[in-house]
Image (cartoon, helix red, strand yellow):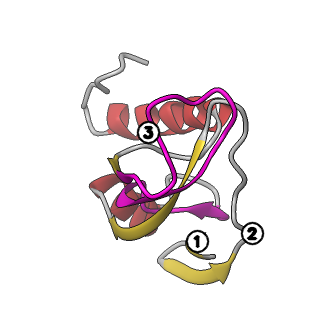
Amino acid sequence: MKAAVYTALKTIEFQDRPMPKAGPGEVVVKIKYCGICRTDVDIYFEGLLPPGIVLGHENVGTVAEVGKGVDGWEVGSSSSHRGSTISTRAIKAFKRELSAWARARDLQPAWGV
């Protein structure tokens, strides 16, 4: 699959990545359209996160695979979400970095970190 990968400050490359597999309690969504949010823009211009991350977590598509124990989703179902495939650990690190960025601009992050 193609992914928009942040590789350096002001640099995004489209790279081939392996198609993810649905684990227990997960679904894989084949993305049809993807938006770029303000955080993605800040990452691109200011380097808020280290290189190697895939940008674009606001997307729509169809369910391509359903993992064990998932109810209410089936292959072919439409999906729209603002989720992310990064790990909880990466999300916490991102929140710490974004919090520091916000505090430097006298802003208070919504999650209160």
* Residue at the (25%, 31%) spot, across then down: 106
Q: Which residue is mark 2?
A: 18
Q: Position of residue 67 (x, y in %)?
A: 66, 39
Q: Residues within 10 Å of mark 2 (few under 14, many from 20)?
A: few
Q: Position of residue 65 (x, y in %)?
A: 61, 53
Upstream in sequence: badge 1 or badge 3? 1
- Tell me, yes or no, whether the two marked residues, 1 and 3, touch with CB atoms within 8 Å: no
Q: Amino acid at mark 2?
A: Pro
Q: Which residue is mark 3?
A: 98
Upstream in sequence: badge 2 or badge 3? 2
- Tell me, yes or no, whether the two marked residues, 2 and 3, touch with CB atoms within 8 Å: no
Magenta-colored stretch includes residue 62: yes
Secondary structure type for disc 2: loop
- Compared with 22, 96 (above or below) is above
Q: Which residue is mark 1?
A: 5
Q: Which residues are magenta?
A: 51-78
Q: Amino acid at mark 3?
A: Leu
Secondary structure type for disc 1: strand
Upstream in sequence: badge 1 or badge 2? 1
Secondary structure type for disc 3: helix
Q: Position of residue 9 (x, y in %)?
A: 53, 72
In the picture, which quadrant includes the C terminus? top left
* Residue at the (49%, 32%) spot, across then down: 95
Q: Residues within 10 Å of mark 3 (few under 14, many from 20)?
A: some
